[in-house]
Structure formats: structure tokens, C-alpha cells
Amino acid sequence: MIDIIEIAKKYFTVTEKEVDPEFKVLKSSKMTAEANQYIVEGLGNMTFQNAKAMFGLMKMEMVCITPLNRDLPLISCDIVDVLGNYTFIFELYDVMLDKDDKLNAALNAIKADYENLPDTPLEEHWYDSIRLDSSVSKKAKKKVLKVPCDELATKYFETIFAMAKEMPEVSDVEAKREASDAYVNGLLTQGGAATKVFFDTFGEEKTTEYFKKVIFGTAK
């Protein structure tokens, strides 16, 4: 994955947050997942997760940004590599207090340059109605996707952080946290791409705590 921390540091102060040892590395016979959590001051929570499964044949990288201090969408970027079969998913979810399409429009202008890359079909989910249309989902061989998807991700993150920097901070941080937490609760109760895997592997209680404290940073 590209160096998102360095991009963020152009616009914000980024400080690493110590992850509770209980959640730093989650291990089971099926998978291992390691998390690194950061506070982007004036923006919100940013967490990276690197996971391996299938005896290391499946490698998964994820970053999730929960903007608790700026009225932006919740952002997640996932890369899955299975024996050179590469999936790139960049998603934005509308947890905004005031509807503003400027960021979505700016990202769609970037997305248009990558429409030639093969899409991956997505199943229907409860969150489709809040998934912004600037979201991207691509799947092909790694040699086809990695370079252009790294380029796309760089442009997306540069645009997101630059526009976030110019925005005022939200006046009601608790309302923003609650809006983001409602999305997390939806994942936990109605499911998501990784929720069932984590439930089956680590249990519902531990997964809930892990999602809220570490991945999304919405815990009070």
C-alpha cells in the first residue's frame, strides 16, 4: 500500500496511538491481523490493518479513516492479494452531518480516468444507500492493477486530506461520532465484507470491541 501517513502529514499532525495489547495482533488458526492506530489531529482516527490467511497465501491490507472532527465521509481502502489475484476497493460512506457533494465530485473526476480498469462485482449490502458513487472496486491480476490503483489511491488521499484541511472543524463532535458509530453498528448487526469473518474467527464480543476501539475509533 502507498504511504498514506506521509500524505496525511502534508496537511495534519499525525500521532501514533498505542493499541491495547489485546488487540494489537489478533491470531487464530485461520488468520492473523495486526493493527496500527493513529490520531490525525483535527481530522479523526486512522487505522491500518495487515492480515494474512490461508497460510500466508492471502494477504490483506486495509486503512480506515473515521473523520470525527471534519464533516467528511468515512473512508476505507482495502487491498487483497491472493496468489497474484489482486482486489482493490476504495469506499466512502456518507456519515456527514451536512450534505456536501464537493469531495465526491472531485473524486469522481479522478475516478473517470480509471474506468478502463476491470471492475469487481459487489453483492448488495444494507449500506449501499450511503456508499458514495466515487467509491471504486477493481479486480484483476496484480501486474495489471497495482501500479494504476496505487496512482488512483494517491490522488484520492491527496484530494481528501487537502480538502479536509480547508474545511472548518465540526461544531458538534459527539453528533459526528454518533453518525460514524451508527455505521459501525450497522456492520456489526447487519454484516459487512469482513464482519462475518471476524465474528467466526474471534467472536462477536471481541470483534465489536476491536471495531469500535481500534478499527474505527468510535468508542467513547
Image (tube, rainbow, N blue to C red):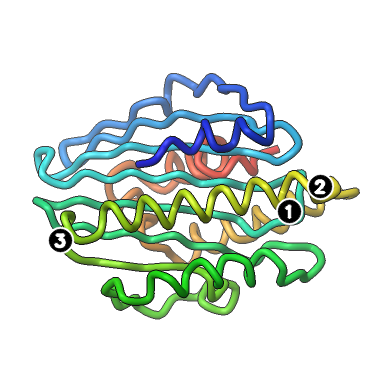
Residue lying farthest right? 171
Q: Earlier in the sequence, mark 1 or mark 3?
A: 3
Q: Residue at x 66, y 55 (%)?
A: 180
For mark 2, does the 10 Å Cα neighbourhood hold few (<14), some (14 to 19), or many (20 or more) residues? Answer: some
Is 107 on the left-hand or right-hand side of 87?
Answer: right
Q: Earlier in the sequence, mark 3 or mark 2?
A: 3
Please, what is the three-letter code of the amino acid marked with disc 2?
Glu
Task: Determine the CA span between mark 1 and mark 3.
Answer: 39 Å
Which one is nearer the viewer's eye here, 113 or 163? Answer: 113
Q: Position of residue 10 (x, y in %)?
A: 63, 33
Q: Label for residue 178? A: 1
Q: Residue at x 76, y 69 (%)?
A: 100
Q: Quadrant of the C terminus?
A: top right
Please, what is the three-letter code of the amino acid marked with disc 3?
Lys
* Residue occupied by mark 3: 141
Q: Position of residue 190 (x, y in %)?
A: 48, 68
Which one is nearer the viewer's eye here, 90 or 199? Answer: 90
Visible residue check, residue 71: yes
Q: Nearer the viewer, mark 3 or mark 2?
A: 3
